[in-house]
Structures are given as structure tokens and as C-alpha cells.
Amino acid sequence: MASRADNIASNLNFGNFAQATELRQRIWFTIGVLIVFRFLSFVPLPGVNPLALDQLAAQTQGTLIDLFNTFTGGALANMSLVALGVMPYITASIVVQMASALHPTLAALKKEGATGRQKLNQYTRYGTVFLCAIQGYFLATGLESYASSQGIEAVVNPGYGLRIGAVISLVGGTMFLLWLGEQITARGIGNGVSLIIMAGIVAQFPMFASNLFEGGRTGSIQPGIIIGFLVMVVVLILLISFVERAQRRLLIQYPKRATQRGMMQADRSHLPLKLNTAGVIPPIFASSLLLMPLTISSFAGGGVTGAEGDVAAATGGFVQQLNFYLRPGEWLYMLLYAVGIIFFCFFYTAVVFDPEETADNLKKNGGFIPGIRPGKRTAEYLEYVLTRITVVGAIYLTVVCVVPEYMIAQTGIPLFLGGTSLLIVVNVTVDTISQVQSHLLAHQYGDLIKKAKLKGRMR
């Protein structure tokens, strides 16, 4: 059953889009910021030879670097100023949100409202700078060692000067991306950080398509596999679009109230509970947690050398063996990825939806669920319903994110366009379109109010 808001949104007249000046300005501002992001992804770090990066990228195809490169929009392969993307911020957000759910002091900050959220955001930024510095140092040292082991002069002057410059540049690039994301959220349309991630993924689509069809032309990929892959993409898009709008609507009954005519009338409304309350957060959190240590260990494993039987050589061999089993498509990677998605589904749902707080708000406003006593029993019922729909949502996210990657690994398609990428792109697109509809709806209401005021003056 469609809600009243859905019916209003379906009747929106997009012909008024040209008259919505503020909306057009927001869209153009968002496009301009994303163009700046794409330009930054081609600006190399100081001290890095961009001509040698192409040879280095060709030798790392089909490895973990390609997967991380997908989320950064090709910035990692170019060793640009924004090579780390916004993934350090996502990882820092995970740590702060988990700490706010477990630590009493941070939990008290979370309940302070806007002031507490501002402090938590500040802690998240501090964590982002710390993670950027660590990942930037390992990225610089790994680039030096890996390029020298492959006989490629990708670094002009290796040493601490390059490492310090790379750390400063990468920290500045990531923080500048966060600033751009905040500007999009405040002055543009949609969520800024999500749009930056989506722009990086979408920027890789032409390369994915060209590799796919080039493999079909050369015969390295069977035509049946290509057709099956395209069908899988279409089915995934339809499934994601359907499930992301699915809701469990709980009936809320309000007691009879006196109207202006002296009649008693009972009000009814619905409490919508999304089937996938966590959205795209679980796969992003799970992938970022897997990518951060794997990227560090990948570079460290390539740089650790020594004589046979040496401790350094044994350590490097262990790290390389660990990276082999944690590659996308391997059973250990799939298992950890699925466990991470399921965990963050329940964790993030518990963070964003508090059954006790919702039950208290309903009780204060006189609302109740038919057949359920207000207060504690309502909170228990909300938790009961939310837990069961979260199980379905977790299974849905696990299937969408894990199964396509397993099929890609089994068929040997040289692509990293899996269900996670499609999930992010479809979710962010649906959310952005919903915000566009909200702006158009507000514009139509504004026109109606203006016409009503003019008619009142004429009378």
C-alpha cells in the first residue's frame, strides 16, 4: 500500500524543474564539486613518476589493489593526492560509533543532541587524520619497495623526504574531500560523502564495460558468461530498488480527540520500519575494515625480504600467504566479508533506532499499537519486529554483496564491479532522487501558498 507521501511524489510535475531555481543551483554545485574530485584523482603525489605508474598498475591487475582502486575512482592507481579517498573517514566513523555505543562518556555525548554530535564528529576527524597518516606512510614505503623489486623507477627520490611529503599530501587530500562532501550536503543535493564514493565507482564503469566486451571480442571471456553477467546486473538493480523501498508499517492508534465541531475522532498513523534499516553502511564498513589491514599487509609483505630462514623472510612469507587467502573470491575473504556485513547490519540498526525511545515518544503523545500495552511492552514488541526484519535485511545484503563477487571470481572475469558497488550506486541514486523530489514538492507547495495569499489579497 502506497503512503500519502508516495502518492504526492508520484504526482510531481517535473515540468516545474526549470522554475525551481534553487534546486538547479544545488544540482550544478554538486556536479561542479564532483568534477573537482575527478580532477584531483589525476594529480600525482610529489616525488612520484606518473609515467612509471602505468607499468606498475599493469602488474598489479587482478589483485587487492584493483578492489581498493574501485572505491577511490582510480585515484590509487594514479597515486594521486586523494589516493586514500574517504575510506579512512569511514573507518574512523566505525570506531567512533562503536565506542559511542559501548563507552558511557561517549554515549552521554551522543544524547546531548547537536552539541554532542558535533564533538563526536570532531573525534571522527581526529581519527581520520591519524588513519590517513598511518596508511599514507605504509603506502609510500610500500610503493618504494614494490617498485624497486619490480625494477620500476616509480619514485624519484626515495627516503624520508618522500614519505613525509606523501603523508602530508594524503592527509590534506582526504580532509579536502571531506570538506567537499560537507559542502555538497549543505549547499548541494544528496549526501556528500556518499556521492563522492558513488562518483568514484561510476567513473570506473566505462573501463569495466570495455574490459568485459574486449574479453568477449578476443575470446578470453565466453559470450554466455557476458550475457549472464549483464542479466545478473539487471536483476541485482531491480532487487536492490525493490528491497530498499520495502517497509514494515506498524499501525499506531491515537485516542479520540475533540475537533472544532465538537466531534470525537480517533487518529491513525503508521510507523514505517525499513527492511534494510542500515542501508549501504554494513558493506562499506565491512569492506573498509578488510581493505585497511589488507592494503598495509600487502605492501609490507612485498617489502619484507631477507635470507632464507631469516625472520624477516618468514614474516614476509606469512603476510603474503595471508594476503593470498584474503583475496576477493577466496573462501576466507568471503566468510569475513559476510560476517562483517551481518554484524554491522545489527549494530548499525541498533545505533540508529532505539525501541525504548520510540516507545516513550509514542506514550507521551498518547499513541499505542493496537493490542500492545504502551511503555515497556511496546518497546519489546518494536525490538521483536525490528530484529526479525533485520535478519531478512542482513540475508539480503549478504546475498547481494557476496554472491556476485563469488561468481566473478569463479568465472574469471577481470572485474571488481560486484554487488557492493551496485548497492552503493543504486542506494545513493535513489536517495538523491528522493531529495530532488522533496525540493520539487516544497517548490510546488510554495507556489500554492503564494497563490492562496494573492487570492486572499484580491478579496
Image (cartoon, rainbow, N blue to C red):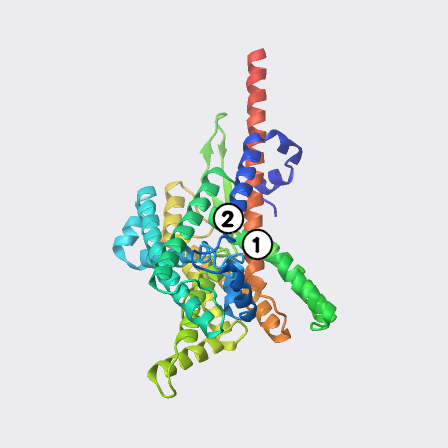
Of 181 and 237, nearer the camera is 181
Residue 242 position (above or below residue 447): below
Please, what is the three-letter code of the amino acid marked with disc 1? Answer: Val
Residue 425 tag number: 1
Residue 429 position (above or below residue 87): above
Residue 254 in view, yes or no? no
Q: Residue at coordinates 39% horizontally, 65% vertically from top-left? A: 158
Q: Where residue 208 sits in the image (x, y, percent)?
A: 63, 61
Of 5 and 403, nearer the camera is 403
Q: Residue furthest top?
A: 459
Q: Where residue 307 sits in the image (x, y, percent)?
A: 37, 85
Sequence-first tag of 1 and 2: 2
Mark pair 1, 2: CA separation: 17 Å
Quarter of the figure with residue 415:
bottom right
Please, what is the three-letter code of the amino acid marked with disc 2? Answer: Phe
Q: Residue furthest bottom?
A: 309
Q: Where residue 118 sits in the image (x, y, percent)?
A: 33, 45
Residue 23 in view, yes or no? yes
Mark in the foreground, 1 or 2: 2
Q: Where residue 45 sits in the image (x, y, percent)?
A: 44, 56
Q: Residues within 10 Å of mark 1 (few under 14, many from 20)?
A: many
Q: Which residue, given by chain and number where applicable, does mark 2 sit on?
A: 37
Q: Residue at coordinates 40% horizontally, 72% vertically from top-left? A: 300
Q: Quick one: quadrant of the C terminus?
A: top right
Q: Does 443 sit left or right of 296 as displayed?
A: right
Quarter of the figure with residue 320:
bottom left
Helix, strand or loop at label 1? It is helix
